[in-house]
Image (spheres, rainbow, N blue to C red):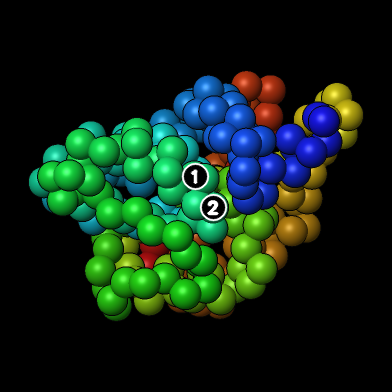
Amino acid sequence: MLQRLTRQFSGPRGPLGYVAGFLMSRMNVQLNQWAVDLMELGPFDRICEIGFGPGLAVELAASRATSGFVAGVDLSEVMLAQASRRNRAAIAAGRVELRCGTAAELPFADASFTRACAVNSLQFWPEPEAGIREIHRVLSPGGRLVLALRMRRTDVGRYSRSRFGFTEKRAVAVRQMLEKTGFTPSATTREIRGETIRALVGRR
């Protein structure tokens, strides 16, 4: 049962998907706060999140971009339902728009956003480079992208998510994708709830 639940984090669905979303909403608060901090939001920013999960970062971003707009895509209809409930007031006010979708085919016009983020979702993208190109397309010049990556650790329990995180080699490859696509990247690392998180911040 625990293994079945662990697999749900890559694309929650069905009853176990709701449980996975509930756990993410409890376990990832600090991580999402850090990612939103790194976007350096102002009141008029327009933000796109890829893989919004239960909608924590969407909620935080909307609370800071008070005269802006937040949009997002996620593969999971279960996560769409949970995130929509969490952000129902902002959605009703036209300040948040959430859809099912993929990073490789963002349903938004060129230069629609000033900020973008993906928090622990890039590892599930079938085509990471295509997704990064799409983010570059929808960001306006000077826009800022934050990719939060859980790094691999071996000094953890059998079912810890950190056992399946990014190796240093793979994190370097993602940074190279950013450079190839036209971003100017930097990196910072933080320990959050016993996990090592690498944030790649790209300026368009």
Identify the residue at the far front of this view: 15
Q: Position of residue 174 (x, y in %)?
A: 63, 63
- Residue 79: mark: 1
SS state under label 1: helix
Quarter of the image where one finds residue 19 = top right
Q: Are marks 2 and 1 in contact (CB under 8 Å)?
A: yes
Q: Quadrant of the N terminus?
A: top right
Task: Name the residue type under label 1.
Answer: Met
Structural crowding at the residue carrying mark 1, measured as other residues with C-alpha within 10 Å and reported as few (<14), some (14–19) or many (≥20): many
Given residues 113 and 73, the one toward you in this image is 73
Given residues 12 and 178, the one toward you in this image is 12
Quarter of the image where one finds residue 114 = bottom left
SS state under label 2: loop
Q: Position of residue 200 (x, y in %)?
A: 53, 52
Q: Position of residue 82 (x, y in %)?
A: 43, 38
- Identity of the residue drawn at 59% across and 73% down: 129
